Each structure stands twice: as C-alpha cells, then as structure tokens.
Image (tube, helix red, strand yellow):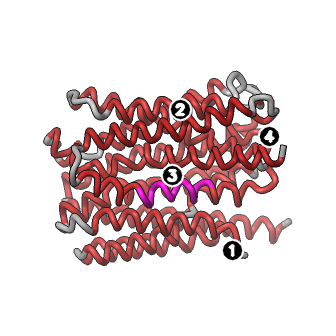
Amino acid sequence: MRRSKKAYKISLLISGVATAVGSGAMGIMLNYVIAEYALPASKEGWMSSLISTGAMIALVTGILLRGKIPKVGFIIFGGLLMSAMLVMKSIPVSFSCFLGICLLLGFGIGMIDSFQSAFLADLYPEDTAKNLGVFHGIFGIGGVVLPLVLHRMLLTLSWRTVYLIIGCFSFLLILQFIVMTARLKEEPVLKRVEGTQNFSQMRQFFQDFQFVLLLICMFFGAAAQNGILVWTVRYVSSFLGDTELAPVCLSVFWICSTGSRIFTPRIPVEPLKILAFGSLISGAAWGIGILSGNANAVLVACTIAGLSSGCCIPLLLNEGAGLSRNNTGLVTSVLMMIKTAGQMISPIFVSSMQAELGMRLAVFLIGIIFIADGVTAAVMVWMKTQKRVHS
C-alpha cells in the first residue's frame, strides 16, 4: 500500500499542474480578451470574477453532495469540466457566451481545487502541513512556467489557439489521474466519504472567534494574491509599457510563492507569525513598487510578495484542517469558499476603482489588502498567545 500510495500522491500532484494552468491562464490572456471584445475599464475584471463565481457555486455544490460522492469523483469531474471549458474558449463567441464559459470554467476549477487539497489531507493525515506545502508548491510550478510559455506562444499563435492547446494539455494531466484511480480503485481511501450530518459542528466552528479570523485572513490573503495574478501583466505591459518584463514579473511571483509554500512549514517559527509579518511586508513592497512607476520595481515587489505571503493559502488550509480531522473536506470547502469570495470580489473591486481613480491607484490598493491580511493574522497570533497564557 505504501508504494501505491506514494505513486497516487505523485499522480495527484501532477493533476495540480492542470489546476494551475486552468486558473492562471486568464491573467496572461487578459490583454488579448479585452482587445478582442473592446471592453471598457469597468468591465475588465468581469471574466476573472465570473471564474471565481463559478468556483464559489462549485464549492457550495460540493458541500451539498458531501456524503454521496467520494472526493476523487469531484476531482475527476471538475478536472474534465475545466479542460473542456478551456477548449471552448478557443471558439469565437459573443462576450456574454464567453462569460458563461468563464462561469463553467470556474465551476470546474472550484470543484477540483478544493477536493485535491482535502483528498491529500486524507492520504497523509499525519503529515498534512508538509504535503499541502509541496502540493501548492507543485501548483506553483505551473504558475511559474505558464506566463513565460504562453507569452512565447502568443507571439506566433492567436489567443484562442493557445486556449485550445492548454485545454488539451490539461485534459492529459487529468487523464493520468483517472488511469491511476482506476488502477487503485479498491483502496479504502478512494471510497471514503464524509458524513452529511456535519453542519452542526460547522456552527460550532463559527462560534469560535479564532475560526472567524481564520476566514477573514483567508479572504484578504486570497484577494491580494489574486490581485497580483490578474493585474500584474496588464499593469506592467499596458500602463508601464514593458511587454517583455510583464510575464517575467508574474513568473517570479510564482517562483517565490512556490518556494514560500514548500519551505515555510520547515521554518521553526509559528506559521501565523510568518504570515502576519510577511503580509505586512508584501503590502509595503507592493505599494512602493506600484507608486514608483517603474517596471523593475514591480518585479522586485512581486519577488518580495511571493516570498513573504506565498504560503498564505496552504498555511490557512492546514490551520483549518487541524480543527477537525474527521471533517477535513467540509472545513476545507468553507475555507475555499472564503478564498473564492476574495478572488471573486478582487477583480471587480480593482476594475471599479480603475474606472474612478485610474489604473495605478487601483492596482496600488492591492497592497492595502495585503496589510489588512497581515493585521488580521497578527490578531490571531495575539489571541493564541493570550489563550496559552491563561491556560
């Protein structure tokens, strides 16, 4: 079982690259889609927000169907839908239809993303933190390579053709996971489902102020990171006029985030302290980089933000999983819903502010969101310290 379990973990990690491709493509394609549909500034964030809205619907659906379908079923369905919608984006359609495809794409991403993390926690309950760090690190590798590869492809191919290619690529990555699942179908962990009568425990979680702060921290952290992922390429290429450095900024952010996700669990410091300090540093660095009006300064800001706050999501997922090892899927789903809400609101917020304040100040506000995340994490650290003192 140990050998097959390790092979299955590798297969799951590979499927995480497909999720990275599906969720990261919009940020690189944004300029081309905006130009294709001649979108005004106030609508530039709609596609990313619709993707996040679809992900939110998927997470709610996953909670309602929990106890009826094993986690691998959610992963496979979500992966196939995500791949199909990436291919669909290669077909010329009206903007309203394109938004509908974005919604379904988000549904697939939300389904696979949530249950990949939860299933990994089931595979390795004794070492969840390190494995989630590795998983999100592998996820990050897709984010590192994707901007550079797509930038080169877009020099010779249309953006619709590029969507066709990455859709087929994602399908292959999901297919290998399907094959591995079929080979190991008799393993008990593949058939495990969580009970449906677990919402009463979730109500208890919401009565814990520490858990509420965990959700707020996830919201701000996801909103800030998504702000970088969605707007960096557009800001550097369109506003600062550096089309070559724009994808490099995004790749560097992913490289540093990947390193942060892998190595933060190994640092002998309380993770929440790292998150609090890192988010505050990220906010300051991002604000300085944007206000400088220099593309190289934005590159430095992406480096610092990735190193300092890239660990945010896996760290908070691990904190949540520790609340109830018997309900990892439910806790993870709620945290992912809050994460998705942050990702959904962030593009609309920035695009709305862009219409009012201009692009520079709108993108600058991402740094303020980072600082709000750091303050929330600092309050969580203080509460934990007070609890230890009085116990």
366 inside magenta stretch: no
Task: Give neighbour class at mark 3: few <14, some 14-19, many 20+ (Cα, 10 Å).
Answer: many
Comparing marks 4 and 3, which lies closer to the viewer?
4
Instruction: Tell how many labels.
Output: 4
Q: Residue at x 54, y 37 (%)?
A: 174
Nearer mark to the viewer, of 2 and 4: 2
Snapshot quadrant of residue 225: bottom left
Pick the residue in front: 212 or 100. Answer: 100
The amino acid pointed to by label 2 is Gly
Mark 2 or 4, nearer chain start: 2
Dot 1 amino acid type:
Ile
What whole-number distance in Å separates the C-alpha atoms at marks 2 and 4? 23 Å
**Which residue is farthest top?**
68
Q: Residue at x 19, y 54 (%)?
A: 356
Work out how far the residue at label 1 is from the one at label 4, CA to CA, in angstroms. 27 Å
User: Which of the marked residues, 1 or 4, is nearer the chain's N terminus?
Assistant: 1
Looking at the image, is 44 positioned above or below residue 366?
A: above
Residue 78 disc label:
2
Q: Which mark is residue 267?
A: 1
Mark 3–mark 1 Cα distance, whole angstroms, equals: 24 Å
For the residue pair 96 and 209, the one nearer the viewer reads as: 96
Instruction: Pinpoint residue 239: horizontal percent, then vertical percent.
Output: 18, 64
Q: Which residue is mark 4?
A: 326
Q: CA distance from mark 1 to mark 2?
A: 34 Å
Residue at numbered disc 3: 219
Q: Position of residue 59 (x, y in %)?
A: 55, 34
Compute the Cα span from label 3 to label 2: 23 Å
